[in-house]
Structures are given as C-alpha cells and as structure tokens.
Amino acid sequence: MIMKTKKFIHALAALTIAATAFIACSSDDDDNNNNGQNVPESEAVTSYDDLSFFQNAIVSIDSLGNFLCRHYGQPLYDNDTTQLYIGVETLAQAEEIFRDWVAPTGNVTKTGNDLTYLLTDYDGKMQGSILFTATTSGGKLAEVTPSSPSLLKHFSKVIFLSNSSWPYNSTEGKYRLGDIRELTVDHNVSGYKNVSYNSVCIREKGNGVNAMFVAISPDLYVPKTWTPKDLLYDVAAVPGEEKGLEISKILRKDWNFFVSCFDAAGMGKLNRDEKYWLNKKKTYLFKTNQWCIDLSKGDVDQVDFQWHNPEKHFLVCVDWLDD
C-alpha cells in the first residue's frame, strides 16, 4: 500500500511539473503573439514596391487602380491626354525630378544621358522597367516610358519639355514659397469632415507642376486598425511614402525657413527627429503597422499600433490645385 502511494505521489508530481511547463510555454506564446510585449514598436522600412512607388509619385490610384489625383505632368494635346508634359530648364533638372520618382532602394543604371530603372516588388520579383531617354527633338529634353504599355495607370509617358518650347505662356502661380493658404479637406471619416488646415506652400507652380501645400495636424492622432474608418487611409490628402520623401527633400533644403513658416501657420510644429504619420498601413500575422517619416532626415519607419498606442501628428499634402 505504501509503495502504491509513493508511486501515485511521484506520478502526480511529474504531472504537475509537466502542466507547469505547458502553462509557461503557452504564456510565452501568448506574450509573443497576443499581448504584444515582444512586438517592437517600430522598425525601419527597408524595402519598397518600385512600381507602386513610381506610379503614385506621378498619378495616385486606389487599390482597384482608379484615378485619384495627378501630382506631376499636364496633358497638352487633346488627341492623347495620357502623355504628360513637364517644363524644365535643363536635362539635369529633368533627371533630378525623375530620380524623385525612384524608391530609395531602386535600381537605376545610367548609360550616357539615359537611365534605366529596373522595377521589383517587396520580394525582389521583377515588375518591368522604366526608361529615361534623353532627346533633342522638337524642344524635348527627355522622355520617360515604361517597358510595357499596361505597366502604368492613367498615363503612358512623361515628356520633359524645354520651358522655352512650352506651347502656352509660361505658368506662374500666385503663391510663393512660405505663403500660407487655408485649405479644406474632407477625410470622409466621422469627426474629420471638411477640416480646415493652414497649409504652407513648399513648392511654387511651374509648367506641368502644380504648387505643393503641406500642413501638419494640430493634434496628435492614433491610427485605427480598420483602415476604412481611419483618416490616414485618405490617400488623396495624407501623403504616402513617395510623397513624404519628396516633402522631406524639399524641406531639408531650407529647414530653418520652413520651420518658421509652419510656426506662422499655427498648426502642428515642424521639429527635427519627430516622426509624422503617412497614409500607408500593412497588416502582418500578429500586428498592424502604420508608416511614418522623420522629415529632418528622410527616414521612413513602420510603427506597430495594434499592441502599442503611438500618438503622432499626421501630414496633409495638396498638390493638385491648378492655381
């Protein structure tokens, strides 16, 4: 009887140890997968979808490929409105604009004055290529064409035209760098309809390029998991990674000047090392990340907000108004 009792106690002890180990392992899994204690709050963005980046830098589209707004280029001829024209002074200026449409990790090779941009997705799979071809024909300085006609949506080609050959009177807008303009944006989200922003002009209007106005939200914002109910999903007003990087490049050219301009606008502040929300969001297995940018450095990060509660100001960018 004593022997049987000892065996029972030993078995019960072993079972208790096994159960404790199982609970501990389950708890570790829960920590990793459910309560987010081991989910990093942010990480640097190191890969891009080149085709999406290039497309949305020129003409923004939604997830179904529908037209949202055009950021660069102007159709000049009614017989082909898919060809967009931009006026520049030099070939070097045309190349600089083209490179703004290239993702930070983009593969661009140069032969003479011509450029080839090899497009790859997040996994490195080839998507096609974009050609930048220098020319001197008919006042043109360069043409930008895709390797396949179906590669790009709502435009087929970008032509850089010498300003001296622009067929109309040179375009000159009424807004100058640093001017403040009140713009009303409907984010199509409850509580954020017809919101007015004091926006700073950071780029003046030119031939085939509209003025660019940027505002920083006065209040901090926490992203929502369900994107259709989140104003950061408003790709027509809140800039994506491609536009955010362009904004950063412009601001860094005269940072202190623009700091004073945003101060005068009376909205959110332009601060070094502060990160501002962009419109891109991505859901992983156990988390959802929102993109943000440090405008003083041009660094793009993705921040988890499913397990954390990050508050940041968001950017508003309007560059499609023809005035």
Image: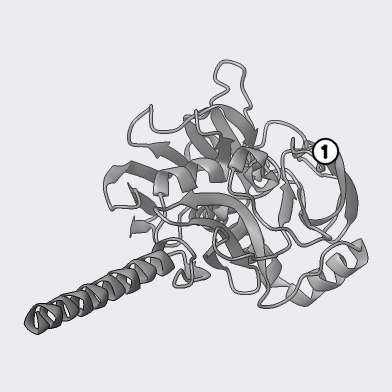
For this orientation, the residue located farthest to the front is 1
Instruction: Give the residue number, with chain letter if any, for mark 1.
Output: 193
**Residue 140 visible in this rendered orientation of the protein:** no
Amino acid type assigned to the residue bearing label 1 in the image: Lys
Residue 204 horizontal/vertical position (percent): 77, 52
Residue 37 horizontal/vertical position (percent): 48, 72
Instruction: State the SS at label 1.
Output: loop
Q: In which quadrant of the rendered view does residue 78 lie?
A: top right
Q: In this view, does 253 lie to the left or right of 240?
A: right
User: Which of these two is toward me, 177 or 64?
Assistant: 64
User: Which of these two is toward me, 107 or 276?
Assistant: 276
Residue 182 horizontal/vertical position (percent): 90, 48
Above or below: residue 37 compared with residue 193: below
User: Which of these two is toward me, 13 or 103?
Assistant: 13
Above or below: residue 23 compared with residue 13: above
Residue 288 horizontal/vertical position (percent): 50, 54
The residue drawn where x is 74% and y is 38% is 189
Count of marks placed on residues: 1
The residue drawn where x is 26% and y is 47% is 125
Classed neighbour count for the residue bearing mark 1: other residues with Cα under 10 Å, few (<14), some (14–19), many (≥20): few
The residue drawn where x is 63% and y is 52% is 89
Q: In this view, does 192 lie to the left or right of 107?
A: right
The residue drawn where x is 11% and y is 84% is 2
Q: In which quadrant of the rendered view does residue 111 lie?
A: bottom left
Q: Pick the quarter of the image with the N terminus.
A: bottom left
Q: Is residue 57 left or right of residue 27?
A: right
Q: Pick the quarter of the image with the C terminus.
A: top right
